[in-house]
């Protein structure tokens, strides 16, 4: 307690002969000055011209306590007068959220005087605090309206006065009006600031609940406070220019008043030391006023006039105007510091709880959205105080925490609500035909949120918060993500983008997502959306899908080649090939099942992945992915040809289509009819060419990779046919495992079919021209022989055990037989799938035979062309 230690220290020093407490003259002068200062302060408290009287009141109370501790005497009348002020000023905010209650201070620090007071009077003063808060809560809304009118009127006066050109003949009048307007702005700022600080801090200190209405009203006052500051700041150049002229004018007025008093002193011939002191002080005041209006000079003037006003050198009607001029001079000379002090809102750091309520109010009243700039300006005032914090190692931690807290609240209570409301409005507007909600503005009301998007970016810390950009980014992100999930909704989100631009002025970014799964050309999704248009005019081109498939296969085949090149795999395959060649005569030209099974199990020794997969499992998945890509091409091709055939079913003969344009010309029909006939010929030509197009895409995907696969640098791939048997064993085990999961509660990884593997094997065998090599293994026949042999052994064992009547062993035998049936069935299904897949790749012909067939066709075409050059041949494809 600094004050406590200060007033309770010993002022008497007997050793030096200093007796302060016994100095009656000093005690009298001390008390007189306290009463004089208090009289000047009390008359101004609560008045419109109040500027710093509350701070001075706290100082007077401090001096009264000091007087009591020094002289141990109490002026009961002054004590009572000091307490009476509490009825008008129940509390004074010293700094930030530190509030000072004068009655508590005087009662605690001057207990002797408190005992002389009536207890009821003291209790009534304390009860006045609750009364003050109740009255303030009731009148706060009206006060806001009044000050809103006062401040806005003052702002208009500021703008009109500062824009007005100064005329030389009215210069003095203009400077007077400017001075009065500047001072009035500072007074408004002080009054509004006092209301906000006192009310908020008293509610917190007394732990009283504040209503939302009061919070909104106080936040409005904060906005008015920052509006005053921004007005001064916005016109700071003109204000600075005016201040220098106004101070000179005020100094001239003060010098004129002092000059009259000085002449009055000089005219009196009765010289005395007191009169000389007064005269000297007046001369000193004149000298101080004759220079720049610095703080030191004004202090000298104030001290000089304390002496200079003695002996009635000034008449009453002269002294009050002089005091007013000097007060104005103080305010005008320190106008920037005064404005900054009175408009400082750093106290809001301790009242951050009001911010969410304020944002909710701004959101509900979007028309006044621009006022949010003032609130963020007020919140920024706390930064300077936090930068001087000493309770943390670095103030950056405190600043980051404050920044995050404010931004989180801002996003939760305004930005995110705004984003969702805009998105909801766009969705309901686009889906009006569904009648999802009653949108009649006369029933449900109307909130124009577009006002938020006309706001300029809000400055906070080292960033600018652009509400329009934030909402635009949210909508762009949402529309893009939802379009990628459901491409068939692209038109809906495109319409919502256009509506956002028209209704809210948002500059939306085009998603640049295809309206289908391809960049151009028709697609499955487009067919599903517009099947009626598709079947009437089929212009499908599968080259797009083939191109993407080619790019996909290129990546997969690189991994495929790496696996086949691995030394462990390559050496094992060479070993198996050598074994088969040496033993095929003894094994009836069949590759042994045990050998393939041994390969499948042995490869697990090379290592497994964290999810338990061997290298062969991963290789099988790679081949399945390649096969699935081929299956996709076939699916699109089949669907396209089916729709195309439906579109051209009305054409009698695709080989003999008449030319309608020539027929119309022969009949001499009109130009419009000829044009229509030409369009019909074009449509028929497109349909015919498209029906013949796209039937050889498997052949294309074989032709593009086969040369590379069969080249000398890829010799390691020629062993592929030998790894197919272990792959089929691995695939069958995987397939049975997936099917068994269908009956389990956790169906993760469950599946009942996977023909991609068969398609992939057939495709790669074709690329390597290894159908004959694979067929030479007679693999599936070897599988059948193996399982039939085991099933016969089980049946034979069952007949033996049935005679022994061993039920447990019989059950085991039945399970074994069932397992063998399942495995054999899976191998048969794989055999049928592989046989079907081989048909797509012309498995009946070798590469040499296909090359010869192609040459024969070309020769036949040339011969036919030379025999009948008048009949053009129809190309097989574009």
Image: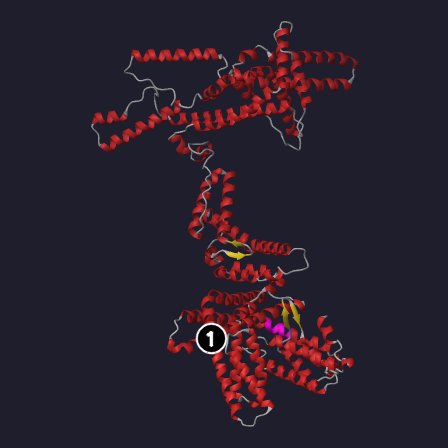
- In the rendered image, which quarter is residue 678 located in? top left
Q: Where is residue 843 in the image (x, y as percent from the top left)?
A: 50, 14
Q: Is mark 1 on a helix, strand or loop?
A: helix
In this view of the protein, which residue sits in the foreground, 523 or 528?
523
Does the rendering let one see residue 755? Answer: no
Residue drawn at point x = 48 percent, y = 84 percent: 256
Residue drawn at point x = 64 percent, y = 73 percent: 91
The question of residue 513 being in magenta is answered with no
The colour scheme used to paint the residues is secondary structure
Please identify the quadrant where the C terminus is shown: top left
Please identify the quadrant where the N terminus is shown: bottom right
Q: Which residue lies furthest to the bottom in this view?
A: 270
In this view of the protein, which residue sits in the foreground, 618 or 306?
306
Instruction: Specify few, some or many for label 1: CA neighbours under 10 Å numbering under 14, 14-19, or 20 or more.
Output: many
In this view of the protein, which residue sits in the foreground, 41 or 521?
41
- In the rendered image, which quarter is residue 793 located in? top right
Does the rendering let one see residue 641? Answer: yes
Q: Residue furthest top?
A: 585
Q: Magenta stretch?
A: 130-136
Q: Is residue 797 left or right of residue 180?
A: right
In this view of the protein, which residue sits in the foreground, 405 or 568?
568
Residue drawn at point x = 34 percent, y = 12 percent: 862
The question of residue 132 being in magenta is answered with yes
| Residue 532 drawn above or below residue 772 | below
Residue linked to disc 1: 246
- In the rendered image, which quarter is residue 610 located in? top right
| Residue 312 drawn above or below residue 567 | below
Judged by its main secondary structure, the magenta piece is: helix
Q: Where is residue 93 in the image (x, y as percent from the top left)?
A: 63, 71
């Amino acid at each position: 307690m600094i004050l406590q230690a200060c007033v309770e220290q010993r002022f008497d020093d007997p050793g030096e002969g200093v007796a302060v407490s016994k100095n009656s003259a000093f005690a009298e002068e001390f008390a007189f000055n306290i009463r004089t200062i208090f009289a000047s302060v009390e008359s101004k408290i609560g008045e419109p011209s109040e500027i710093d009287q509350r701070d001075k009141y706290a100082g007077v109370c401090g001096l009264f306590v000091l007087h009591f501790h020094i002289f141990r005497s109490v002026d009961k009348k002054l004590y009572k007068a000091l307490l009476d002020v509490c009825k008008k000023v129940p509390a004074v905010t010293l700094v930030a959220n530190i509030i000072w209650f004068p009655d508590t201070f005087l009662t605690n620090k001057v207990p002797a005087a408190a005992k002389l007071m009536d207890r009821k009077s003291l209790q009534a003063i304390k009860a006045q605090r609750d009364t003050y808060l109740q009255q303030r809560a009731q009148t706060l809304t009206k006060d806001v309206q009044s000050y809103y009118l006062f401040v806005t009127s003052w702002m208009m006066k500021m703008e009109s006065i500062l824009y007005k050109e100064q005329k030389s003949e009215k210069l003095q009048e203009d400077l007077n009006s400017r001075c009065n307007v500047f001072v009035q702005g500072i007074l408004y700022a002080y009054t509004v600031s006092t209301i906000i600080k006192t009310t908020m801090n008293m509610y917190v200190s007394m732990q009283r609940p504040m209503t939302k209405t009061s919070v909104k009203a106080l936040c409005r006052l904060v906005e008015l406070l920052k509006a005053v500051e921004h007005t001064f700041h916005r016109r700071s150049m003109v204000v600075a220019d005016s201040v220098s002229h106004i101070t000179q004018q005020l100094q001239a007025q003060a010098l004129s008043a002092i000059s009259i008093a000085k002449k009055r002193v000089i005219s009196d011939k009765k010289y005395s030391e007191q009169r000389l002191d007064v005269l000297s002080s007046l001369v000193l005041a004149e000298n101080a006023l004759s220079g720049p209006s610095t703080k030191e000079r004004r202090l000298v003037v104030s001290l000089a006039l304390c002496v200079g006003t003695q002996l009635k050198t000034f008449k009453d009607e002269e002294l009050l105007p002089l005091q007013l001029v000097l007060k104005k001079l103080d305010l005008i000379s320190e106008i920037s510091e005064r404005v900054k002090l009175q408009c400082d809102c750093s106290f809001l750091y301790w009242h951050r709880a009001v911010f969410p309520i304020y944002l909710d109010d701004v959101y509900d009243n979007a028309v006044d959205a621009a006022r949010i700039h003032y609130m963020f300006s007020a919140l920024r005032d706390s930064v300077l105080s936090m930068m001087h914090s000493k309770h943390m190692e670095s103030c950056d931690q405190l600043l980051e925490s404050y920044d995050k807290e404010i931004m989180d609240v801002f996003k939760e209570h305004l930005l995110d609500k705004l984003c969702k409301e805009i998105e909801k409005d766009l969705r309901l507007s686009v889906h009006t035909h569904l009648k999802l909600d009653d949108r009649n503005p006369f029933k449900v009301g109307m909130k124009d949120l577009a006002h938020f998007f006309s706001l300029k970016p809000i400055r906070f810390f080292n960033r600018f918060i652009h509400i329009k950009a934030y909402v635009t980014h949210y909508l762009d992100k949402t529309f893009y993500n939802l379009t990628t999930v459901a491409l068939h909704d692209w038109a809906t989100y495109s319409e919502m983008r256009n509506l956002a631009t028209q209704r809210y002025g948002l500059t939306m970014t085009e998603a640049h997502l295809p309206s289908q799964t391809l960049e151009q050309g028709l697609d499955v999704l487009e067919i599903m959306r517009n099947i009626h248009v598709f079947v009437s005019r089929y212009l499908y081109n599968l080259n797009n899908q083939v191109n993407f498939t080619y790019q996909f296969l290129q990546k997969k085949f690189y991994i495929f080649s790496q696996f086949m090149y691995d030394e462990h795999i390559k050496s094992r395959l060479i070993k198996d090939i050598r074994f088969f060649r040496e033993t095929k005569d003894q094994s009836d030209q069949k590759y042994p099942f045990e050998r393939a099974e041994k390969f499948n199990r042995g490869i697990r020794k090379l290592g497994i992945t964290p999810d338990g997969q061997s290298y062969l499992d991963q290789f099988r998945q790679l081949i399945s992915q390649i096969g699935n890509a081929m299956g996709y091409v076939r699916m699109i091709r089949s669907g396209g040809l089916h729709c195309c055939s439906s579109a051209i079913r009305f054409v009698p003969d695709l080989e003999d289509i008449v030319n309608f344009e020539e027929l119309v010309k022969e009949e001499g029909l009109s130009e419009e009819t000829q044009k229509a006939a030409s369009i019909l010929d074009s449509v028929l030509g497109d349909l015919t060419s498209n029906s013949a197009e796209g039937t050889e895409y498997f052949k294309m995907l074989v032709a593009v990779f086969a040369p590379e696969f069969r080249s000398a640098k890829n010799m390691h791939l020629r062993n592929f046919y030998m790894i197919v048997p272990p792959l089929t064993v691995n695939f069958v085990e995987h397939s049975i495992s997936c099917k068994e999961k269908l009956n389990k509660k956790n169906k993760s990884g469950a599946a009942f079919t996977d023909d991609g593997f068969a398609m992939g094997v057939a495709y790669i065998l074709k690329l390597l021209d290894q159908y004959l090599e694979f067929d030479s293994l007679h693999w599936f026949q070897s599988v059948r022989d193996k399982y039939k042999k085991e099933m016969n052994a089980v049946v034979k064992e069952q007949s033996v055990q049935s005679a022994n009547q061993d039920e447990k062993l019989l059950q085991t035998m039945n399970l074994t037989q069932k397992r063998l049936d399942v495995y054999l069935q899976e191998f048969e299904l794989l055999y049928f799938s592989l046989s079907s897949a081989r048909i797509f790749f012309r498995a009946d012909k070798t590469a040499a035979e296909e090359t010869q067939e192609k040459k024969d066709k070309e020769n036949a075409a040339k011969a036919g062309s030379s025999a009948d050059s008048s009949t053009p041949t129809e190309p097989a494809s574009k």
